Image (cartoon, grey):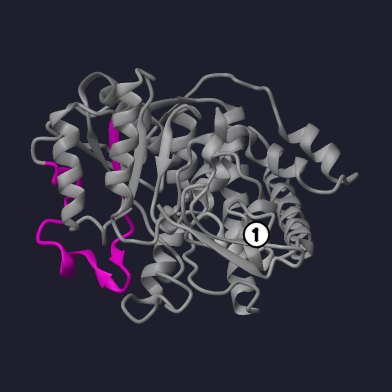
Amino acid sequence: MASSSLLRRAISSAPSSSLLRPMSARLFSSDETVLSIETSVPYTGHKIEPPSRIVETSPKELLSFFRDMALMRRMEIAADSLYKAKLIRGFCHLYDGQEAVAVGMEAAITKADGIITAYRDHCLFLGRGGTLVEAFAELMGRKAGCSNGKGGSMHFYKKDARFYGGHGIVGAQVPLGCGVAFAQKYNKEGAVTFALYGDGAANQGQLFEALNISALWDLPAILVCENNHYGMGTAEWRAAKSPSYYKRGDYVPGLKVDGMDALAVKQACKFAKEHALANGPIILEMDTYRYHGHSMSDPGSTYRTRDEISGIRQERDPLERIRKLILAHDITPASELKDIEKEIRKHVDDAIAQAKECPMPDESELFTNVYVKGYGVESFGPDRKEIRATLP
């Protein structure tokens, strides 16, 4: 679905290359033979019968999952380097390890459905149709960024694909997402909104207020707890008396999902969308893991061991799981997958080079996008050094 075109879109934003053309022709297989694959672990339901563990997929979709997750991971690793080089400033929260949630969710929905999330938002933006150049330009505060260089890492945005951001206030995106779901129901759009939050935000009071009114009005809202097991540096068991987040809705059904298995995520999101359109809200708890620390100021090793991190990489890595499935079903040889990864590295490097050439926003942009058009403070005049204020 939407996921399969991610690298194709990314390639279209890069300079033409003789290497890109034959690779893209080779990789974008049209083989849609139906494969039935069992999820890594069973789903666990709360007040609902879980979906089947058998997920239908195809060689084409598995390859698209591999490409998209490899692209997302490379982007995040590159962002780490750019931050350490001081080309990215301020806050920066990386998503590597959690890519299966973004990719699996996109495979189950359409662009008519909305997504809103917290500040770990780069990969979700990419999945919604954003380009690498837009992502890196925004991270580096350039005018060509998805938020015109004014949002930075925590405030990616793509209105035309109903990606409503990146939010820096913990948990505040959930009531907004429920509001989007209200609009979808009011306008009879037949679509849903996924409101993503972390285990650290799961104890926020506003989340329960939003869930309550969503349940009262049967809104098509899907609350997705991306449980990576650490709220900043605090383990979930130290912050939550009940870390079974999929049960937190009490009267609202919930489902626990292996968030490191893209196929399990796809099946769960498809199931949740059907439920939400017919019955109202549902909670999905994605059992996932982040490899980096909470943010760039967090080494990620003071509250967990390196053995824990390497153990997750070896046993549950979402990208490696898809690689094993591709090889097990003889879809393409291991050497082809290595070629994909090499090409992705080159493409990411090209996108960074383009983003670095983009100009910074004009100083006058400090005064825009603050008040509704026609009000607020604006700069004008031949050198834009005169300021005028208009308030209601």
Residue 328 shows up from this direction: no
Q: Where is residue 7 in the image (x, y as percent from the top left)?
A: 67, 41
Q: Residue at x 48, y 41 (%)?
A: 163
Q: Which amino acid does label 1 sit on?
A: Phe
Query: From the viewer's perspective, is 208 left or right of 18?
Result: left
Residue 275 shows up from this direction: yes
- The front one of 317 and 346 is 346
Q: Position of residue 390 (x, y in %)?
A: 49, 57
Residue 248 on the magenta span: yes
Query: From the viewer's perspective, is 209 left or right of 317?
Result: left
Q: Residue at x 56, y 57 (%)?
A: 368
- Residue pushed farthest right? 18
Q: Residue at x 32, y 32 (%)?
A: 181
Q: Position of residue 230 (x, y in %)?
A: 30, 66
Residue 32 on the magenta span: no
Indicate the secondary structure of the residue bearing disc 1: helix
Asked if 101 appears above or below 272 in the picture, the reply is below
Q: Residue at x 48, y 50 (%)?
A: 99
Asked if 391 appears above or below 92 in the picture, the reply is above
Asked if 359 appears above or below 41 in the picture, the reply is below
- The front one of 283 and 315 is 283
Residue 53 lies in quadrant: top left
Task: Specify the segment rendered in magenta.
Answer: 221-249
Query: From the viewer's perspective, is 371 left or right of 188?
Result: right
Q: Name the residue under label 1.
A: 136
